[in-house]
Amino acid sequence: MKYAIIGTSWITQAFIDSANTQKDFTLGGVYSRSLAHAVEFASKNNCDYAYDDLVTLAKSGVDAVYIASPNSLHYEQAKLFLTHGKHVICEKPAAVWPEQLRRLHDLAHENGLVFMEAIMMLHQPHLKTVKDSLEKLGKIETVRLDFCQYSSRYQSYLDGNLPNIFNPQFATGCMMDLGVYVVYPALYLFGRPKEIITRANFLPSGADISFSSLFLYDDKHIVLTASKAAESRIGSEILGNKGTMTIGTLFQLADIGIEYVDGKKEAVIGEVPRLELMANEVKDFIRYVTHPRESAQELAQAQQLSLTVLETIAEMRRQAGISFPE
Ligand SMILES: NC(=O)c1ccc[n+]([C@@H]2O[C@H](COP(=O)([O-])OP(=O)(O)OC[C@H]3O[C@@H](n4cnc5c(N)ncnc54)[C@H](OP(=O)(O)O)[C@@H]3O)[C@@H](O)[C@H]2O)c1
């Protein structure tokens, strides 16, 4: 299978490095707004095909595309490739609005193609290990899911620049960037909450820089926190009356253990190399494309979760007053 890439930042290079660990999945096209940059990026990755025109790339012989452009561009770009018969793996969040994501799922389905949101944690075998381990914790009433990471682009913003990540024009900000990493595990592990309360803090650019949210269920509360201007040091916790699960790095599902009320400790998952994280995601994408019948149910479940996460994030954005230009 030949794939193309849109976007040439570090995450695309990480995707290519992970894709290179898979057999029969080769880079067959590089798109950049600048042809010179596309040529340079392609040649660095042993690819002979560079483009500065998306339609020409969509009409080329590649089978699939990996989209890693700013969020606000995902929908139109994914639609273009799906209507040209290409499978799509699209960076998170795959769309800005749930209706857009529903349309992309429908388009893929109608054309016998795969559309997959690139969310690494969903493709880690560890996610099921975490779910299966919950019963060891006893009755769970309190959960704290946290992803606060000082952004490498925050200083640039403070220096008077406007990086895409803090420019609402691109449907970015903390909720769109980090929100998925706390909402995905909340919904995967505990389902949809009955009620949500969300508040955010904003930069003068209009982008949210941090948010807190409370997910209320009949029998438990989940507190979700995320920030791009501060670094959390204590990670996430799932607290039960028999034991507490600590999750050191939530987005990687790494460094996870249980400490029981009698003081006994159990390691659940250790460190996970980033290359392996993305490789698992790529592996699933290839499997969905090459074994459509066998993987149809799994893909449908992943798409349903992806949609429920985006619906939830849209509601959190509404409550917090996070908005983007049309
Ligand atoms: N899964 C993960 O761990 C992870 C990590 C980081 C980011 N992401 C996701 O990946 C996507 C890209 O994030 P990023 O931080 O890499 O974004 P970015 O640096 O702002 O832009 C990514 C690429 O899009 C192109 N681009 C930049 N500005 C553009 C504009 N104004 N119009 C059209 N194209 C533009 C650039 O490629 P050219 O200059 O070559 O055209 C750039 O390399 C986002 O959806 C983000 O959520 C995921």
Image (cartoon, rainbow, N blue to C red):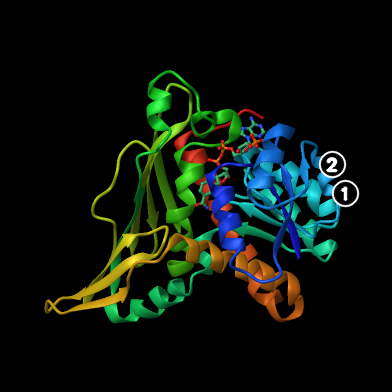
Pick the front one: 115 or 142? 115
Task: Residue 240: tell me if it is visible.
Answer: no
Q: Quadrant of ligand 1?
A: top right
Please indicate whether residue 74 sits to the left or right of residue 159 in the image: right
Q: Element type at marker 2?
A: helix
Relative to 111, is 134 on the left or the right? left
Q: At label 1, which amino acid type do we have?
A: Lys
Task: Classify 285 as above or below 206.
Answer: below
Amino acid tagged 2: Val
Identify which residue is drawn at 68% across, 73% down. 287
> What residue does disc 1 label?
59
Camera-side residue: 153 or 92? 153
The image position of residue 251, as x and y in percent, is 42, 57
Circle 1 sits in a helix, a strand or a loop, which is it?
Answer: loop
Give the percent coordinates (x, y) of residue 102. Answer: 71, 54
- Please name whichever residue, 201 or 250, is drawn nearer the observer in this view of the structure: 250
Q: CA distance from mark 2 to mark 1?
A: 6 Å
Closer to the camera, 129 or 308?
129
Left or right of residue 102: residue 57: right
> Is residue 227 in view?
yes
Q: Position of residue 98 (x, y in %)?
A: 64, 49
- Which label sits on residue 113? none
Q: What's the mark number on residue 55?
A: 2
Please say if the residues under marks 2 and 1 sit with CB atoms less than 8 Å apart: yes
